[in-house]
Amino acid sequence: MNRPVVVGVDGSPSSLVAAEHAAQAAVGRDRPLHLVHGYLHPLGYGVPLNPYDVGIPAPTEEAQKMLTQTATDLVGRWPGLTVEARQVAGGPGATLIEESKRAELVVVGSRGHGGFAGLLLGSVGSQVAAHAHCPVLVVRPAEQPVPTTGPVLVGVDGSESAELAVGYAADEAARRQAGLVLVHIAPDGDPTAPPELGDLLATAAAAVRGSHPGVAVEERVLRAAGPGQALVDASRDAALVVVGSRGRGGFTGMLLGSVSQAVVQHAHCPVLVAHPYGHAR
């Protein structure tokens, strides 16, 4: 199955930056790119003038022109890219979550219109990052260019979710021909690292070197009061941060753990949320 890279496009600067990242990802993976515009109200309905007319509206010519122009621009900048553009009768968040069932990767912009100050991810991006059925790439604000240098950074805590994240991070590092930094956050104020901490990082590093022998791996222990802020700070020098959908201590039913939420909302570079493929929710 030739899963596509999927990105939601609504014509906003944030979505156009997301489309650029998505094109880069599609070319790197040798996958087609699907531009999707979910054109219904977020509640799942149209917004009719007549309250008794609750029909599903038709796709608009204006939106189709926007999609066509975006596709044309991307093909011009990324030779060899195959692009499909279409409108879908659905709310933008629900549409991308449904598309993620058949996608290699879903890309979302950092914030749409009306986001709260300090929160980099809007409601649609938050829905997709939490509920998607495949990995989700969250890209940064429109004024920041697509990063081309720096290592891939991933947190290691021994959880199953982090193990999946390390695997995705190694794939990304190999694809980008970049280094991989494995990070574990140790409690601040404790000058000695427990032996199991070194074993945790060494085991993860050995697994990566075995599966991706061409990737340079660095093991790093960061001391901080909390892992979320430490990873956000470390993201300043990274091209990409990879997080699991839930680490140790996550409550059942919480689809994105507190550390991952902090990184997704505040990181200084793109963030890949490592959902497993086809995971039923």
Image: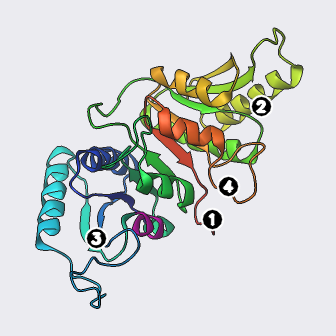
210 lies above or below 16: above
Mark 1 or mark 4, earlier in chain: 4
> Within the image, what quadrant is residue 247 found in?
top right
230 lies above or below 52: above
Mark 3 or mark 1, earlier in chain: 3
Three-letter code, disc 1: His
Q: CA distance from mark 1 to mark 4?
A: 14 Å
Q: Which residue lies under the disc numbered 1? A: 279
Q: Which residue lies under the disc numbered 3? A: 39
Q: CA distance from mark 3 to mark 4?
A: 28 Å
Mark 3: give few (<14), some (14-19) or many (20+) Cα within 10 Å.
many
- Secondary structure found at label 1: loop
Mark 3 or mark 4, earlier in chain: 3
Instruction: Work out which quarter of the rendered image holds the C terminus and state it.
Output: bottom right
253 relative to 2 in the view: left or right: right
32 relative to 128 in the view: left or right: left
The residue shown at (27%, 37%) is 142
Measuring from the top left, give residue 186's x and y in whole percent. Answer: 75, 21
Mark 2 or mark 3, earlier in chain: 3
Measuring from the top left, give residue 195's x and y in whole percent. Answer: 88, 20
Residue 214 visible in the current orientation: no
Three-letter code, disc 3: Tyr
Q: Which residue lies under the disc numbered 4? A: 254
Find the magenta span and give its range: 93-98
Q: Are marks 2 and 3 in contact (CB under 8 Å)?
A: no
Mark 2 or mark 1, earlier in chain: 2
